[in-house]
Image (cartoon, rainbow, N blue to C red):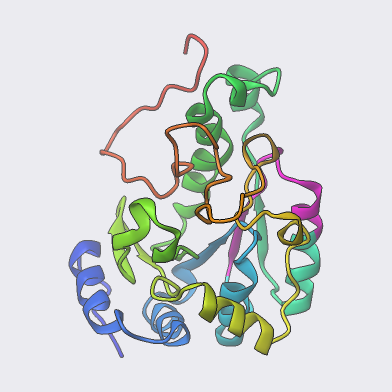
Amino acid sequence: MAYDTLDRPKSLAARLDAELRHAHPTTVIEAAVEQFGDKLALVSSFGAESAVLLHLAAQVKKDIPVLFLETGMLFGQTLDYRKTLAAHLGLTDVRDLRPHYQDLATADPKNDLWKTDTDACCHIRKVLPLDRAIADFDAWITGRKRFHGGDRLSLPVVEQADGKVKFNPLANWGKAELDAYAAEHQLPAHPLVAQGFPSIGCWPCTQPVEEGEDVRAGRWKGLDKTECGIHVARAPGAVVNLGGDI
């Protein structure tokens, strides 16, 4: 499978999606690596379902750059899991992305911006660090799935966003497939899953989920918010208020 790297990202993504929309996740990852090589990264939260995608990727390319958003607000269990899982899978290039000191000093000096503006908090702790890191790549892999609902219900396997090609190898998989794969390969679970956290983000904005609730119901509970912002398309040159009087 070979494609012209001079193709515009949108047309290339459309052609790849048409070819890969029913493919096994491993085939999608292999196609991404073949097409983009060292210009491909994988973004992982090392959260509740992350082990499956990371294991799949490790079978294809153990030195794939894995970008981990270390927001400074993560659960201690997540930080421990990031280290143990990366070692378990033999991943050799996991990069911790942290918010810039100046962004925090200006917009969130007391580390309490999450109380008043979760969008701005996510922007300086997730969106900006990822934007800086992803600039070095032409494409990236995500762990999003349609069964998570919301805006993800119509998620394609390959898409274009902000000038990059994005691969969603697990888009077609449901919880049954994820659980079966994790069991087959004896993948270690995130320690908070057993405590009722099926989706795990930063500790101030993540709660356990009640029986019968959506998988992501514990994220920003009570707010009209379902995404942190890294998967929200932005207009070119768009400026996001960082909070305060900026």
Q: Is residue 76 magenta?
A: yes
Tell me the magenta residue range. Answer: 65-80
Relative to 24, 101 lies left or right: right
Relative to 239, 96 lies left or right: right
Residue 37 location (% of width, % of height): 45, 77
Residue 57 location (% of width, % of height): 56, 79
In the image, farthest residue toward the left: 11
Q: Residue 121 lies in what quarter of the image?
A: top right
Quarter of the figure that contains the N terminus: bottom left
Relative to 187, does residue 75 appear above or below in the rendering?
Answer: above
Q: Is residue 148 magenta?
A: no
Q: Residue at x 64, y 61 (%)?
A: 48
Q: Residue 104 lies in what quarter of the image?
A: top right
Front-most of 219 and 78?
Answer: 219
Residue 58 visible within the image: no
Front-most of 200 and 141?
Answer: 200
Q: Residue at x 61, y 22 (%)?
A: 115
